[in-house]
């Protein structure tokens, strides 16, 4: 087995030794470890950081995707059978909730130079979809975007709900706005290796008060315990609830996807380092990107339109499958931990082939699936590691003669 010397993730979270000591002290003195004040505090500070009105903390980024779609169904923003477009290059649990909740997924391909869906490709999807697209669950892949502002305009003009999976792009700024703020709502992940790690955890942000309230109910059984007293009173009066039953009345479809106080504590601590973490990732990215542009075997990435690139991991897409195989071996033998780009093309995944009958194609996402991988970019990389990755990116390899 190849020993990975340069790892995608070095630590469970940033400043691990210091934060572990703080966590131990917190655990010694905490009166309660189920969802409580630490979680509510994080929701408040994260809303301010993201410049959104409401944040709902949950137990994972995948749960955030599920909760958001369920809350939209609960409110009637969507109904079962509606078509929901999604970025073809994404993570499985961006698409799975669409299927699980009785909605119909429809892929939108990505541009090779941005790895994200563009307004042009979105408009093509609108034209080609067999039924009207009612929502677009766009994924902001790896800290990048295409012209998401134009996608937002299309959605407003055509009455399409735009929601963002921003799990890989915390802190990226495009045209003066952070990604995650171009939509009705956006989801975030705080899993190990992400910009902020709480070991597990996720969140949904929105400016829509009604959706924010519904997300609180959807997170915990569909009951009203965590709502404001005014909202509780309104619901209980509307449904004529006897006070004996008010703590055990379930108003909407929901789950138990609550976070723990440990999640809230760690996420809050990590948020204090957000600017430092993002700055290091951005610096690493620039060096790796500059190196990659010197190698004609690699499809060049275009990020000139993005003001601040908060990169999750560094993607490398090769022009030919044979080149991909050679470079994959080269990086692995050099001790670099690599993996497929995000989850690859969802259209190539077994679950999608099993449950989706659409003839839609996403050739660019498929090319990335077949010809790409990504490299480490974490804030704990040292100078030598970044330099090594840069040299590996710059060094061209020779194809076999029969190629």
Image (tube, rainbow, N blue to C red):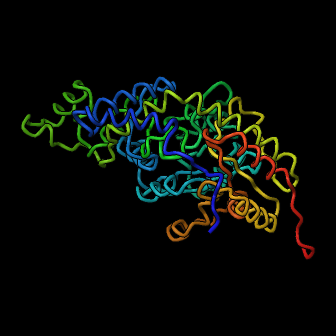
Instruction: Write down the quadrant of residue 37 in the picture.
Output: top left
Quarter of the figure that contains the N terminus = bottom right
Q: Residue at x 68, y 56 (%)?
A: 336
Q: Residue at x 55, y 31 (%)?
A: 181
Q: Is residue 328 left or right of residue 358?
A: right
Instruction: Write down the quadrant of residue 120 in the picture.
Output: top right
Residue 208 position in % (x across, y down): 43, 30
Depth order, front residue of 195/9? 9
Residue 279, placed above or below residue 80: above
Residue extending furthest toward the bottom: 402
Instruction: Confirm whether residue 46 shows in the render.
Output: yes
Quarter of the figure that contains the C terminus = bottom right
Q: Residue at x 76, y 67 (%)?
A: 325
Q: Is residue 39 left or right of residue 187?
A: left
Q: Is residue 58 left or right of residue 251?
A: right
Instruction: Confirm whether residue 211 shows in the render.
Output: no
Q: Is residue 61 left or right of residue 58?
A: right
Residue 85, placed above or below residue 274: below
Residue extending furthest toward the right: 401
Residue 308 position in % (x across, y down): 68, 30
Residue 169 position in % (x across, y down): 59, 39
Depth order, front residue of 230/315? 315
Image label count: 0
Depth order, front residue of 118/320? 320
Residue 397 position in % (x across, y down): 86, 61
Q: Residue at x 43, y 41 (%)?
A: 77
């Amino acid at each position: 087995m190849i020993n990975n010397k340069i790892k995608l993730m070095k630590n469970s979270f940033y400043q691990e030794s210091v934060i572990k000591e703080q966590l131990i002290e917190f655990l010694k003195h905490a009166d309660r470890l189920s969802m409580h004040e630490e979680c509510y505090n994080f929701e408040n500070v994260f809303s301010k950081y993201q410049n959104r009105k409401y944040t709902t903390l949950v137990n994972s980024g995948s749960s955030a995707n599920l909760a958001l779609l369920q809350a939209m169904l609960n409110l009637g923003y969507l109904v079962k059978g509606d078509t929901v477009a999604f970025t073809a290059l994404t993570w499985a649990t961006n698409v799975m909730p669409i299927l699980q909740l009785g909605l119909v997924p429809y892929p939108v391909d990505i541009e090779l130079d941005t790895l994200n869906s563009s307004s042009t490709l979105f408009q093509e999807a609108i034209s080609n979809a067999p039924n009207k697209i009612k929502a677009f669950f766009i994924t902001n892949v790896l800290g990048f975007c295409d012209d998401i502002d134009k996608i937002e305009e299309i959605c407003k003009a055509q009455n399409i709900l735009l929601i963002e999976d921003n799990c890989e792009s915390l802190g990226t700024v495009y045209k003066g706005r952070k990604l995650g703020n171009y939509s009705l709502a956006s989801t975030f992940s705080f899993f190990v290796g992400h910009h902020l790690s709480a070991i597990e955890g996720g969140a949904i942000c929105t400016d829509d008060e009604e959706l924010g309230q519904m997300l609180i109910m959807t997170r915990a059984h569909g009951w009203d315990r965590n709502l404001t007293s005014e909202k509780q009173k309104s619901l209980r009066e509307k449904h004529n609830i006897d006070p004996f039953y008010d703590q055990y009345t379930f108003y909407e479809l929901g789950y138990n996807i609550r976070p723990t106080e440990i999640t809230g504590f760690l996420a809050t601590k990590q948020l204090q380092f957000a600017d430092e973490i993002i700055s290091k990732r951005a610096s690493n990215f620039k060096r790796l990107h500059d190196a990659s542009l010197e190698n004609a075997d690699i499809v060049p990435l275009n990020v000139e339109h993005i003001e601040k690139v908060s990169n999750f991991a560094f993607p490398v897409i090769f022009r030919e499958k044979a080149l991909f195989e050679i470079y994959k071996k080269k990086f692995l033998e050099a001790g670099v931990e690599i993996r497929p780009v995000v989850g690859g093309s969802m259209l190539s995944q077994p679950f999608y082939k099993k449950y989706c009958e659409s003839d839609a194609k996403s050739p660019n996402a498929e090319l990335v699936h077949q010809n790409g991988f990504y490299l480490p970019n974490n804030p704990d990389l040292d100078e030598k590691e970044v330099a090594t990755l840069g040299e590996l990116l710059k060094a061209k390899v020779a194809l076999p003669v029969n190629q």
